[in-house]
Structures are given as C-alpha cells and as structure tokens.
Image: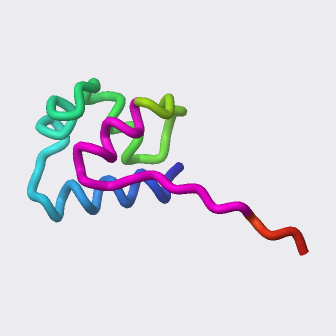
Amino acid sequence: MSNIGQQIKERRKSLKVTQRQLAELSGIGINTLTKIERGEGNPRLNILEQVLDTLGLELTTVVKSIE
C-alpha cells in the first residue's frame, strides 16, 4: 500500500493540490487521505478509486507468472 500511497502523494504534489483539497474533491476525509499517502490503514477499493480518479490515475492489476 505504501507504493500506491507514494504515487498518490507525488501526483497530488505535481498538480499543486493540498491534502485538504484532494480530500474534498475526492469526497473522503482528510484523515483517510493522510493514512493512504503514508501507506497506513486499509482503505476500501471504492475509496482508493475515488482518489485515483480525482488525480487522473487508474488502478490496474497484473497476474503474476508462476515459475
């Protein structure tokens, strides 16, 4: 989770958006956003998608190969 949290933080900063602004735009609490960026907590997928969508990002999955 910390990797995605770091990507969210970097994207937010590149857009010059504060945590409070992003939380409001995403419709989530500031404490939730702070925890996501720190890699803490366990946000529901829909919460994560709201933040990513607001930042113009998307979540993708990749199937691991078994070797």
Q: Is residue 23 magenta?
A: no
The tally of labels here is: 0
**Residue 33 appears in which quarter of the rendering?**
top left
In the image, is residue 6 above or below residue 52? Answer: below
Q: Is residue 47 left or right of residue 43?
A: left
In the image, is residue 18 above or below residue 7? Answer: above
Name the outermost residue toward the bottom. 67
Residue at horizontal 25 percent and vertical 60 percent from the top: 11
| Closer-to-camera residue (18/26) | 26
Q: Is residue 58 left or right of residue 25?
A: right
Residue 66 image position (x, y, % from top left): 87, 68
Residue at horizontal 11 percent and vertical 50 percent from the top: 17
Q: Which residues are magenta?
A: 47-63
Q: Is residue 37 left or right of residue 16?
A: right
Residue 19 image position (x, y, % from top left): 19, 41
* Quadrant of the image containing the C terminus: bottom right
Residue at horizontal 47 percent and vertical 46 percent from the top: 39
| Closer-to-camera residue (34/16) | 16
Q: Is residue 54 magenta?
A: yes
Residue 56 image position (x, y, % from top left): 25, 54
In the image, is residue 10 above or below residue 25? Answer: below
Residue at horizontal 39 percent and vertical 53 percent from the top: 58
